[in-house]
Amino acid sequence: MNNGKKIIEVKNLKKQYGDFHAVKGIDFEVYEGEIFGLLGPNGAGKTTTLEIMETLRDKTSGAVLVNGFDVDKHQQEIKQIIGVQLQAAGYYPGLTLLELLSLFSGLYNRDIDKMEMLGRVGLQDKARAKHKELSGGQKQRFSIATTLINDPKIVFLDEPTTGLDPQARRNLWDLIRAIQAQGKTVVITTHYMDEAENLCDRVGVMESGKIIAMDTPDKLIDNLVAKGFERKKEVKKANLEDVFLSLTGKEWRDD
């Protein structure tokens, strides 16, 4: 949970592509030590917002501060304190996972235990496999491992569990909680509302470039119920995913 200190501040942020307004003057804060979820349908502007905070995309106007650093003036300082999940295209396909970790740790001038890092995402047995030989889910898991190489204060995860089986998804939830437990801040986007409800201390919901709601998941649910919303089906104490994991186990699988 957060300690009340703002680590990211977004003020009247706008991003425009020609006549298209992708982000329309949004304001929000992320607090140190929390898991913050940025939610919304495709095209809502959440990935654009994330990339501006990561210094990967220029904004049109507004202000964004990351740990007190302005994204316009202090990009190098920001890059030193953040971990960004790369997509599969960001890796050399012919290198092994150990070689890739050596490459990235060298870029960050960090000495890391590569096998321990792979173990955190269940990929020790793939240490000498080439990146191009991994399945889609394995590539996703490896991408999260690489976000931790520089021991960042803030970790950005863009749809980290897309395409993963239930075991891998739940294990990555545990990993994300463990990252938070180390005192790090996590900013995540996801299309899975159960994931946001389980992981996030607070969420912001974007629609058409605007933030239309922001609070804790519990508070947003309570607000909806207070308006008279009722589920047609009684909520049970478990769901089908719980049944699946109970039957098949929770260990990592090759996918």
Image (tube, rainbow, N blue to C red):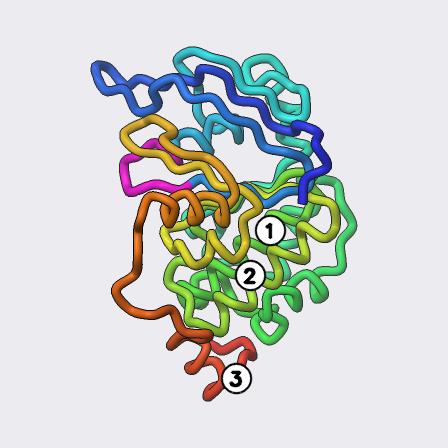
Disc 3 to disc 1: CB gap under 8 Å: no
Location of the N terminus (image quadrant): top right
Residue 180: give x, y in percent of width and height.
Answer: 67, 50
Q: Is residue 223 left or right of residue 117?
A: left
Q: Which is more toward the observer, 61 or 204? A: 204
Residue 200: give x, y in percent of width and height.
Answer: 54, 49
Q: Find the distance from the CA under tag 2 to the CA under tag 3.
A: 16 Å
Residue 5 lies in quadrant = top right
- Three-letter code for the amino acid on which mark 3 is drawn: Gly
Task: Identify the magenta region.
Answer: 39-46
Q: Is residue 145 left or right of residue 241?
A: right
Q: Is residue 213 above or below residue 141?
A: above
The residue indicated by pointer 3 is 249
Disc 2 to disc 1: CB gap under 8 Å: no
Residue occupying the point 46% across, 33% down: 50
Q: Secondary structure at mark 2?
A: helix
Residue 146 marker: 1
Earlier sequence position, callout 2 versus callout 3: 2
